[in-house]
Amino acid sequence: MNIFSNIGITELVVILLLALLVVGPERLPEMGRKLAEILRDVRRAYDNLTAELGPELQSIQKTTQELRESVDSVRSIPQDTLKSVVSAADLDDTIAELKGVTTGLEEVRQTVNRAGKTMKDPVGAAVGSAREALLTPKQDKDGESDAPEGAAEQTTEKAKEETIREADEASQEQAGD
């Protein structure tokens, strides 16, 4: 235990100058001796504690390390067991198939929801489909429109608005019945 390991020459000179100014030149040697005695006593007490408690502290440290290793090995058991069961039963393909089935079921659920909405309000669904068809022509994978050539020029904004207005009126009449 070296308490002066982080003190350089310049720091030591500054400390000595400060001590000389604070204590004075007459009492500085006496203060130095007292400081040396105190440091010697502290070091002796530390050495005694280390000698008395050293083996016990090492035993505690060893026990603590063993406990940490035991906890780490117990934590890895579920992961290791799961990996071994999956690999032993060759469940990787089954898991991938189940994920595919889950995705398919989600698509079916969405389709059934859309069909249910259509059955509850067929006119509203038709109006929505007509709006989609008139306002945004569908495009295929190549980015080409499904509409026949020249259809964009034939369909004017006025015709679109009139068709949407008629569909809205029909929807309102259906709701009133």
Image (tube, rainbow, N blue to C red):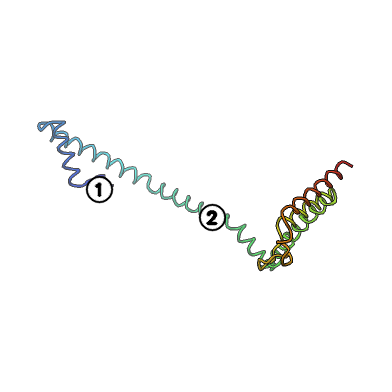
In the image, taking residue 88 as reference, residue 120 lies left or right, namely right
Locate residue 4 relative to residue 102 in the image: left or right: left
Residue 163 screen position, x and y as percent = 78, 52
Q: Quadrant of the C terminus?
A: top right
The mark nearer the N terminus, 1 or 2, is 1
Q: Residue at x 26, y 44 (%)?
A: 3
Determine which residue is flagged by label 2.
72
Is residue 115 toward the left or the right of residue 50 in the image? Answer: right
On the image, numbered disc 1 is attached to which residue? 5
Task: State if disc 2 and disc 1 touch (CB < 8 Å).
Answer: no
Q: Secondary structure at mark 2?
A: helix
Q: Secondary structure at mark 1?
A: loop
Q: Say which of 37 and 120 sits in front.
A: 120
Amino acid under disc 1: Ser
- Label 1 to label 2: alpha-carbon separation: 38 Å
Q: Where 25 sits versus 175, above or below?
A: above
Residue reaching furthest to the right: 177
Query: Label 2 sits on what residue type?
Result: Asp
The residue most toward the left is 26
Return the residue nearer the eye: 148 or 56: 148
In the rendered image, which quarter is residue 16 located in? top left
